[in-house]
Amino acid sequence: MFKTLENTKVFRDPLYGYIQVKHQVIADLIDTKEFQRLRRIRQLSGVSMVFHGAEHSRFSHSLGVYALAYKALSDIEILKKTLSEYEQILFMCSALLHDVGHGPYSHAFEHVFMLGHEISTTKIIEGNTEINQVLSKHHKSLAKDISSVILKMNKFKIVEQLISSQLDIDRMDYLERDAFHTGATYGRLDKDRIFRMLTIKDEKVVFKEGAIHAIENYLMSRYHMYWQVYYHPVARSYEIILEKIYKRILDLYKDSKLDDDYASYLKTIIENGFEEDAYFELDDYYVNGLIKRFSHSKDDILRDLCLSFLKRELFDYIEVNTNEEEKMSRLVYEKKLSEYHYKIDQVTQRTYLIEEFDILASSIHILKSDGSIVSLDQVSPIIKGLSTSGIKTDRKLYYRGSHE
Amino acid sequence: MFKTLENTKVFRDPLYGYIQVKHQVIADLIDTKEFQRLRRIRQLSGVSMVFHGAEHSRFSHSLGVYALAYKALSDIEILKKTLSEYEQILFMCSALLHDVGHGPYSHAFEHVFMLGHEISTTKIIEGNTEINQVLSKHHKSLAKDISSVILKMNKFKIVEQLISSQLDIDRMDYLERDAFHTGATYGRLDKDRIFRMLTIKDEKVVFKEGAIHAIENYLMSRYHMYWQVYYHPVARSYEIILEKIYKRILDLYKDSKLDDDYASYLKTIIENGFEEDAYFELDDYYVNGLIKRFSHSKDDILRDLCLSFLKRELFDYIEVNTNEEEKMSRLVYEKKLSEYHYKIDQVTQRTYLIEEFDILASSIHILKSDGSIVSLDQVSPIIKGLSTSGIKTDRKLYYRGSHE
Amino acid sequence: MFKTLENTKVFRDPLYGYIQVKHQVIADLIDTKEFQRLRRIRQLSGVSMVFHGAEHSRFSHSLGVYALAYKALSDIEILKKTLSEYEQILFMCSALLHDVGHGPYSHAFEHVFMLGHEISTTKIIEGNTEINQVLSKHHKSLAKDISSVILKMNKFKIVEQLISSQLDIDRMDYLERDAFHTGATYGRLDKDRIFRMLTIKDEKVVFKEGAIHAIENYLMSRYHMYWQVYYHPVARSYEIILEKIYKRILDLYKDSKLDDDYASYLKTIIENGFEEDAYFELDDYYVNGLIKRFSHSKDDILRDLCLSFLKRELFDYIEVNTNEEEKMSRLVYEKKLSEYHYKIDQVTQRTYLIEEFDILASSIHILKSDGSIVSLDQVSPIIKGLSTSGIKTDRKLYYRGSHE
Amino acid sequence: MFKTLENTKVFRDPLYGYIQVKHQVIADLIDTKEFQRLRRIRQLSGVSMVFHGAEHSRFSHSLGVYALAYKALSDIEILKKTLSEYEQILFMCSALLHDVGHGPYSHAFEHVFMLGHEISTTKIIEGNTEINQVLSKHHKSLAKDISSVILKMNKFKIVEQLISSQLDIDRMDYLERDAFHTGATYGRLDKDRIFRMLTIKDEKVVFKEGAIHAIENYLMSRYHMYWQVYYHPVARSYEIILEKIYKRILDLYKDSKLDDDYASYLKTIIENGFEEDAYFELDDYYVNGLIKRFSHSKDDILRDLCLSFLKRELFDYIEVNTNEEEKMSRLVYEKKLSEYHYKIDQVTQRTYLIEEFDILASSIHILKSDGSIVSLDQVSPIIKGLSTSGIKTDRKLYYRGSHE
């Protein structure tokens, strides 16, 4: 039996009103230094350069995903019946901790330093951390099982699908939360209806037909949030500058020219990969401090990139279709761009969205009134149409223009 | 020069905050008895039987459309420049008055009594009414020109497109307003963006490419509002009962059996078609009073239908595909249903939506950065996909089940 | 044991999202013809003449109060523990039915025909009605006990306080709902906090100190809603015309001049007081139909009043302080106003608000951390201040001006 | 004539929708590095420790105040007429720049380093900065005049009152914005009404009587936001830790023990007071980086304070009334608290709110219908009551408890 708090704890959330915490283990996890670290990592790095309201942290989002897990367990009778108490706790903990391993400016960070956030997340959960201590205190296998959920090891199938699939509580929270903070008019989901229509069949999370319109709407919102918000060229441009800053730091390190001791935690990670203590230090506070510091670096390239970042001198961009390699080469040649000053950014490649629209046919399961299970595209002509037509590729060359 | 008010008048609107009235003619129109009559006609008749919050009137909606016309003229520079003062006034008056001819429970009413609301609207505008007096006082051709806009006579092309097209201020208001009152999560539009991207080219209302996502979102919202709200079977069922009540009244009249003098205004309309004084009397207050009264009628069929309406004993329904005529005939036969007790209701036929998705290719114009104008489907793969796949037909047999 | 539904029923509410119904008895009550009748009675009669969005019905509000009862039982642990299953059902049923006896344009109706809505409510609950049948079927004493709650007989103290006191779920719903529909910016309450701080001590509903700001805010919102919305002179003026219409009908009846058989149900009530069948007929549909009909009455006074009502020709008004009786008499004399054409309307007299601010000191109980219970004014200097200074009286003479 | 942009620029705001920029000078100011720096300074430092959503920056708020200035000039006819074009530009620029001099964790910063943000603001505006260059380019006296507005030199009286008084656009923005992000239910203002009732008389900003309820509501919202949000003990506790960190840094500096070169910009400020280049470096990024760095300091006190800050180990607190000095001294003595580990924090002293309630009587001017101007308290019994009773003092001892 997992201990419950004498008095429910609450967190005031701008989207959900009160978020309730009833279990000791959840309260303890929130208080760990590794979870508190998420306050210091923004959810949407470059996006706030376009949408100034989008300054919220991964802490907010993580609490939000937990809140949806809690709500799912309150609202959906069949979940309460199907999941054991242990699995319910596992579900809530996994929801809370699913992003705990994110680094500062995560996408650029992962890309340059080759350290995926899922791996870091499981290492924080299972390593020598306060989070691990809390989990172990409450149940000996909890840490391991949360990792297995996050890595989708197929051990707790229902919980895994609820946390991460085409339609999961992670996405449901971030779409609404990001829409709220950016001021986007899309992104409001009919969570109540989706939850009400959610049921379990043969260890599969399925949705009754009454959910189809709500799910179509969710997929369209997601589509629009990606193009309007996440893939906004100004946001991309900003992220690319960051990536270049990381890359330059890495290259300076390789050339033994990274001598500032303030960079020591980053060095540790470069040298050893994940390490609890160093990783704990890596957050926006640290990296932003580093960038501010390197805006006075002796290295021209690094200094210049950091100044661009701080003064919001974004990279310019042009569209470059796949058959226009020449156009691109010419520009790179004429402008004498170094590898730190341009990047081809093709959004399709990195868009889970587009891939998902394909896979999606097989992955959002609709339970028909006759008891059969079909994939969404078989009952939604809209989604079927989108799975072939709703693909949009965006390929741009971002490059440092002249700022004087 | 049209007179402006010394002090701007305002109406507090739950969606838009203050709605401002600056022109004498608008203030005068709102005060006419024909416009005030719209307070007594609900916007969504049967829908409130499913969504209890949807109890708002055509008065609210009409003010709302005016408010969007006013906003368009404030926000969109090119409109202010392109439209003369007279056309601006024409635009706002047409927005305000476009629905003034709606009858009580309009769709059923039009269908049974064969009196379209556009015709009634123009007759109210040009006939012997307070509205006509107001318009004539302010400008001699105003009444005639508003009619020409409402009937789409191609005289004031830009104003016509703004008032009624695939993407117009009428739809923009009712989608958001109906969503607000029903509690639907869809239906929030990015009006600011749509207006910001709207421009005029060769007397055409066109939208810059930056509007595409907002328009896609609008079309999807509309699609979902139709299926989730406007075509909800409970709402349809309720409307059908109303239609049958109207039909029974008409048939009793034809058989000279409609002897209640309370029905006199309806009789006038049946006999003479539109007539100002009688039509003014026709509103929800009148029809609801009639239904209450006829719930004690000696005519069994009429009494029974009125009671069903008042006690919310809705018609049952089953799906009947086009190749299932037999199934339907059998049910009608077995249940011994009279013509007042069943109806085949095929939503596609009556759905402007679906038809629109086809026409739409040619009707929402996108202005590309190279100056060319294309139809939306050529630049939006989603809409292209929908124009072939996004069609959904719903054909149901509604019939009086047994209630005892 | 009260029966629960196999599948939870839901109602989509514009304020609360889904309202859930889990018990058979609640579902059955909602389906009765007496409860459905509330769809035909507007919550705020005259107010919609000022705030055009305020067209919602008592049906919406009644469902809303039920929803808050349901929420209270979900959110507040101590309620669940303190109240027996029977009391919980009693609580929810009382919440749902507390307004079921309201007549059309209730305040004017009660005032003229001397039939209070609480009495009618209990007669509907205990009389020969579908509601009574439903209640009796589920539990033999339920009807009687709901009446006792509504009449505040002190039998179920906690339930009574939750339903009707200075801070109850009835007010919480209508303040927010009316604010939502009028577009008022006030009126949003911190329900979550108030519920979270609510507890039970010695059969008293008390609030922990952490609720003080939320309660202050609620009282201020209520104060502002009264003055800005409920007591708006245009709304008052409209109500007064209605009252005069009712009065004229009554007087014509007394003089045996009310010969229209359409008025029969009203006659029954005038003659016999409450009677189930006649009362069921009395709703806005009926009265509005009557007013439309009487707008063609031979009686000049009645016809004229009904026309004013329909054409929104409101009574004028001037302020008349208590020491200005003369001013008033002169105006009445000079304008030759008959008793149907003017009214002194003093809002303080009828304001529960102001009286409540006095009583309030003794009635909202705050539980201090030392376990003692004090009245709100002892711990809130703001409320203490308001209880002496926050009284505002408004005394106006409304009278028929000249309209030609 | 001030130059306008060919195409209006827009910023998407979560509260206001699109914020429009029409003037070149505003667009240029936003692009300066000093204004962009505000992205790196949070609006509510410690508050986000209690309300996790409150992570927005001064950049958002500053844009928001500009947006209200723009709105005021659009909505309020008399402003447009009364203010010259120059004054209008002055108004919008002052709104935008009024907070540009804030330091990181501003209140603590100002308190320890004795450098007020108003002074820094005017030095940035008039000093050797990009902002000054922009202003000078557009008009030679603009920089000086903005300073005079911010310092309230009485030269541009109307603009000064609009920017900073008891009821100004600065407060209107931050109350709503902070409420939005914290999730507080209070804080929604009836801006439309307040603006609509605002007028100018004898160079005074006054409000017509119709604004009284909206202003009462605004004052109550402010009162509640202060107590519920800004003065929340957890937020205070966090701010106090920050203050102690700053203090320890200052003391180490004085003892010549601050040898980390990363601290150089702070040293410059300590030594020389305001200096453009160093001040530009001072932002949350810098201070947070410093705190992270000093969490490994050799100085025990500094390291420990920084760790508390990062791990959210807040100071404990007890209430200490003015006559309980002994109680406090005992605790300080028993716990052996150093000056870095406790603080008496009396909120009344620092509350502008309370002081304002007193001053307020003379400062919010109400224009009566007879043309006379009175102070709000003379026409609002509520405010009169509050000015004597609505004072609440909170005096707490915050101290470092034991964390192990």
Image: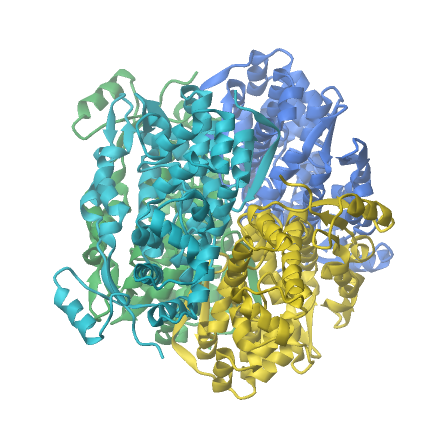
Chain colours: A green, B cyan, C yellow, D blue
Q: Position of residue A246 (x, y in %)?
A: 38, 35
Q: Quadrant of residue D247?
A: top right
Q: Is residue B329 above or below residue D279?
A: below
Horizontal side, residue D166 vs residue A336: left or right: right
How many labels sit on residues?
A: 0
- Tell me if I can see residue B122 in this picture: yes
Q: Is residue D315 above or below residue D20?
A: below
Q: Position of residue A344 (x, y in %)?
A: 27, 31
Horizontal side, residue C219 vs residue C267: left or right: right
Along the line of sight, the residue nearer the viewer: B266 or D329: B266
Horizontal side, residue C75 vs residue D212: left or right: left
Give the residue furthest to the bottom.
Answer: C140
Q: Position of residue C389 (x, y in %)?
A: 82, 53
Along the line of sight, the residue nearer the viewer: A306 or D195: D195
- Tell me if I can see residue A253 in this picture: no
Horizontal side, residue B260 vs residue C181: left or right: left
Along the line of sight, the residue nearer the viewer: B62 or B256: B256
Q: Position of residue B43 (x, y in %)?
A: 43, 50
Along the line of sight, the residue nearer the viewer: D46 or B10: B10
